[in-house]
Amino acid sequence: MSRRLLIPILLLAAAFVVPGQTSHAQHENYTLRIATLAPQGSTWMRIFNAWNNSLRQRTDGRLTLQFYPGGSQGDERDFIRKMRAGQMDGAVVTSTGLGQIVRPVMVLAVPGIFREYSQLDRVRHRFQHQFEQQFEAHGYHLLGWGDAGKLRLFSKTEIRRPSDLRSVRPWAWRDDTVFTEFLNVVGANPVRLGVPEVYPALQTGMVDTVPSSALAAVALQWYTRLHYVTAQNMGILIGAAVLKKEKYDALPDDLRTALDETSTQAHRALRRAVRRDDERAYATIQRRGITAVDISANEAEWAQAAATTREHLAGRLYPRSLLERVTAAAGQ
């Protein structure tokens, strides 16, 4: 065959082969395994399931989110370990889990800065790019911010002032540096357990006081073992969905775009739903026998304990300059 005929034939063959290869790559299916403590049927899981349905429809089934709810993969420390080991691709975690990846993010969880959602929204928006870069540097992609409701103290006996915590058995999440430090500041002795261990500990009396939002206390059934809740909140429980960066980067461009856009919609819906349902849960538990305790008469003591906690953690969890900038942004 002459050289003049061979070249056009080869070019024609390439025209058929290359599109075929691209088509195969475009139609490959992907499943992202995501762990969460949120129980099946909870506000969080309803939104996550809707997110998965929306994403599957948007991508014609090429990208699926497989959630593992209710702590089936352990506690948040286990989620982080499994992501690092390649056993999970992502996780929905609270500040406790986020802090195991990027410690400075714990500045969003310290007591006494955020009482209202508008403050939290303003700060997260202002520091969004900074935190995204820090997660990327540690090998994670931040999919979206979530909330878990307003932080209150649930207890079997009335808690009116910080010193009351010395005579009870307060639970502190094993990896939660912030609340553990708060208890140390007020002279209380924390009982350090993982989240899956709390309900059995309430049953046996091993713990009798837990920090929680009303929504989380209902979802995890903790409120059924307790009698009082502080009427005023100490802060706002935050969370986020994170994905291993290598898993995110491995997705084709169109699937990454679909994931990011549906994630933005899902997390916006999640924040609205959690804030609404947390208020409803707070009202519901009072109708079911939980007594709200007004701690405003001792506000100065609570504020002082919170300020001391923030000060002790500056330089350990987050730079002092970051604390100052976050505090200033929240107060605007």
Image (cartoon, rainbow, N blue to C red):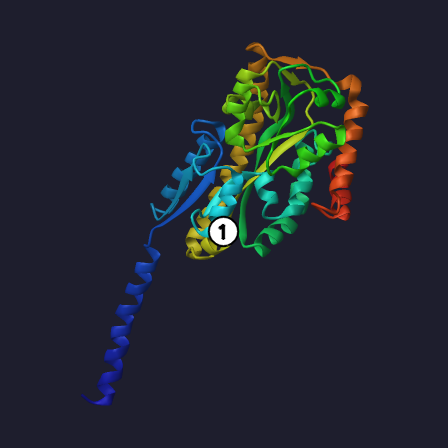
Is residue 9 in view from this perspective? yes
Q: Residue at x 45, y 32 (%)?
A: 70
In the image, what residue occupies the spot 63% across and 18% down? 155
Quick one: 47 or 155, which is closer to the camera? 155
Count residues near mark 1 (Cα–Cα under 10 Å), then give few for <14, some for 14-19, many for 20+. some
Amino acid type, residue under disc 1 in the picture: Arg
In the structure shown, which secondary structural element does the residue marked by tag 1 occupy? helix
- Decide which of 8, 270 is in the foreground and name it: 270
Residue in front for this viewpoint, 87 or 198 = 198
The residue lying toward the viewer, choosing from 146 and 222, is 222
- Is residue 264 visible in the rendered image? The answer is no
In the picture as drawn, the residue positioned furthest to the bottom comes out as: 2
State the image coordinates of residue 304 (x, y, percent, origin top left): 80, 29
Locate residue 314: give its quadrant: top right
Residue 323's place in the image compared with 256, above or below, is above
Q: Position of residue 281 (x, y in %)?
A: 55, 19
Which quadrant: the C terminus? top right
Query: How many numbered dots are placed on residues in this image?
Result: 1
Residue 106 percent across, percent down from the top left: 66, 41
* 128 displayed left or right of 3: right
User: Circle 1 is placed at which residue position?
Assistant: 84
Residue 102 falls left or right of residue 304? left
**Screen quadrant of the N terminus:** bottom left
User: How far from the left and from the top, in percent, is residue 112?
Assistant: 73, 31
Q: Residue at left 53%, top 16%?
A: 224
Q: Residue furthest left?
A: 1
